[in-house]
Image: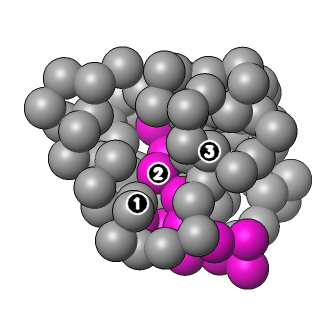
Amino acid sequence: MAKANARHILVSSEEECNDLKQQIIDGADFAEMASAHSQCPSGQQGGDLGSFSPGQMVPEFDTVVFNETVGDVHGPVETQFGYHLIEITSRDS
């Protein structure tokens, strides 16, 4: 079964999500931005969600993590929790 490792930043608005994404594109450290801005407890670990398989996260999250490019920052991705920036750090099939 496929497994992936990812980290994310969860915020309440699409605008804030886009702003943080631009800062990361411009060179800000993803983990530092997660620690400072994420509303998810994982923010204290730089947004690290560890290893997981399909079906362990909400569908919108899974779709990105198991289909998009590893190493890129994806988002905003809207879920029932808010808006996410997602960085897929590794994936195997």
Q: What type of secondary structure mainly makes up the magenta span?
A: strand
The quarter in which the C terminus is drawn is top right
Tags 1 and 2 in contact by the CB under 8 Å rule? Answer: yes
Would you name the residue on which mark 3 appears?
38
Label number found at residue 25? none
Q: Give the range drawn in magenta.
A: 76-87
Q: Mark 2 points at which residue?
A: 85
Residue type (three-letter) at the residue carrying disc 1: Cys
Which one is nearer the viewer's eye here, 51 or 23? 23
Q: Residue 17 carries which label?
A: 1
Label 2, secondary structure: give it: strand
Image quarter hosting the N terminus = top right
Mark in front: 1 vs 2: 1
Circle 1: is it few (<14), some (14-19), or many (20+) Cα within 10 Å? many
Residue located farthest toward the right when viewing the structure as drawn: 56
Taking 28 as reference, is 65 above or below it?
Answer: below
